[in-house]
Amino acid sequence: MKKVENCKLISKTEIIDGIFDFVIESEDISKEAQCGQFLHINCGDSTFLRRPISICDAENGKVRFIFEVKGKGTEELAKKEVGDCIDVMGPLGHGFEIKDSVKNAVIIGGGIGVFPLYKLAKNINADVFLGFRSKDRVVMEDEFNDVSNMVIVGTDDGSYGYNGYIASAMEQYLDSHKCDMIYSCGPMPMLKAVKKIAESRGIKCQVSLEQRMGCGIGACLVCSCETNKEGTDRYAKVCTNGPVFYSEEVTL
Ligand code: FES
């Protein structure tokens, strides 16, 4: 059973409207956390279920997570103030697989899906693609630039950077660059496009899935996703088998 800890909130910033950047103190989580894992957070007394929120970064006793206020739970979480304690379970799940044999990696994230990719970008050499709806939703560009070979930012409405879907920018890049692994996290249409591009070119691809969760530890089956396997293995649990899967394993 994963440990539940009361962790002190030591930094809180609303980086853009409705998106909060929290840093909590936890020696254990910061030591254990792997790229792409998540925390299961008790947002407050008025919400029964914990909320899964991906780890953005973890080092030196500090754990950072960034979330968008989307409902009652995250609304309550956003009201926490520096000095308050947050009830956190984790780190949980199966994160990104980092292989020494990979020589040319690409990271692609869309919207709030860029946050779980930051620790990964710090840990590997990769060219990075970040997509957002519009210029006013662009986040973490400088931070990714500081830790990556190259960063391409795009907006769906063309108000900043590459004009169009970020998967299209990556596809154009792949026409003239080698790539042997794609790491991705973002909205489902982006993940579907990335999976299709990767598989049509024979490139291995890992996708981080967002899913509603109950227990977060494999007991309730709320988080099932369909795989390409037959029989009893047809459904996987996003909380324990994922949230990161190889694209060829799952049906998106
Ligand atoms: Fe309960 Fe995954 S959230 S099994």
Image (spheres, rainbow, N blue to C red):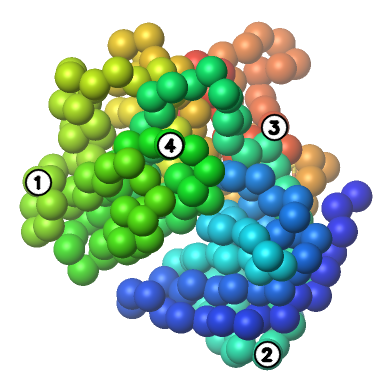
User: Dot 2 surroundings within 10 Å: few (below 14), some, or many (20 or more)?
Assistant: few
x 79%, y 46%: residue = 217
Between disc 2 and disc 4, the foreground one is: 4
Residue identifier under label 3: 241
Q: Secondary structure at mark 1?
A: strand
Q: Secondary structure at mark 2?
A: loop
- What type is the residue that disc 3 sits on? Asn
Residue identifier under label 4: 125
- What type is the residue that disc 2 sits on? Gly
Q: Is tag 2's residue or tag 1's residue first in the polypeptide sequence?
A: 2
Q: From mark 2 to mark 4, how far is it between C-alphas?
A: 36 Å
Residue identifier under label 1: 163
Between disc 3 and disc 1, the foreground one is: 1
- Residue 80 visible in this rendered orientation of the protein: yes
Residue 46: percent from left, percent from top: 69, 80
Q: Is tag 2's residue or tag 3's residue first in the polypeptide sequence?
A: 2
